[in-house]
Amino acid sequence: MPKVPVLNVEGSPVGEIDLSDEVFGQEVNSSLLHQVVRMRLANARRGTADTKTRANVSGGGRKPWRQKGTGRARAGSIRSPLWRKGGVVFGPHPRDYSYVMPKKARRAAMKSALSSKVLENNLVVVEGLAFSEPKTKTMVKILENLKVEGKTLLVTALPDENVKKSARNIEGVKTFPVGNLNVYDLLAYPKLVITKDAVERVEEVLA
């Protein structure tokens, strides 16, 4: 069972938390993580690309010249795909790229992503985050105290507007409640700062 120190906003340890092996102690499945990221990117595609076939291009209803006797190749339409300004063969048309992976696979991928944070020492558990009002300077100071640099994912147990507004102007920092936690962002942001309450909610859902 992995043990991680719990820090306060000053960066001082105030205890330890035992992380669930079932959630934070799993073997990292790179193939499964790759599949989930592909699904996320596919579901984000708009699928609105469209091309005109020879049937959709205006004009070309009359045979450009007679079949025989001209010395030229036979042609039935000036909108043939072989011609300039003709139709497109096998071009893209509007379609839905989205698909859904099995629930068990998505849960396993989430556990793999969380376990990777523990293995790479990129998981920081903070006792709590409480802001009476939005203050970016205070959030910057807290991240400095926690010795967190670079792209960071900040996860709270419940939606907190003051925390969100305090972090939104800090480059490379993204924050949301634990209900919005996803594999894509866990992989995109190397550092994970999560409140103790949020850890308990994650284990409650995934364990």
Image (spheres, rainbow, N blue to C red):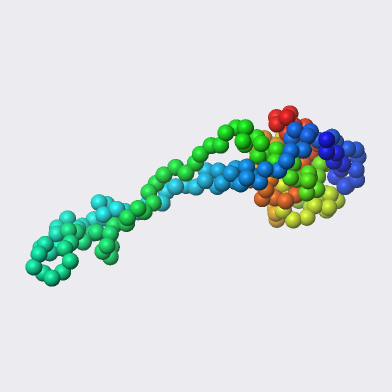
| Residue at image point 27% right, 62% down | 82
* Residue ID at (90%, 38%): 15
Q: Residue furthest left?
A: 69
List the single residue furthest toward the bottom.
Answer: 71
| Left or right, 101 with reference to 192 | left
Residue 22 position by quadrant: top right
Q: Where residue 149 sits: x, y (%)?
A: 78, 55
Q: Kindly identify the residue that appears in the image at 90 percent across and 43 percent down.
A: 13
100 relative to 31 in the view: left or right: left
Find residue 142 and report its horizontal and vertical position in percent: 82, 49
Task: Say whether residue 135 is visible.
Answer: no
Q: Position of residue 72 (x, y in %)?
A: 15, 69
Residue 81 x, y percent position in the rendering:
28, 59
Of the pair 151 and 120, the residue shown nearer to us = 120
Tell me the quarter of the picture where residue 164 sits.
Answer: top right
Quadrant holding the N terminus: top right
Residue at 17% across / 55% down in the picture? Answer: 61
Quadrant occupied by the C terminus: top right
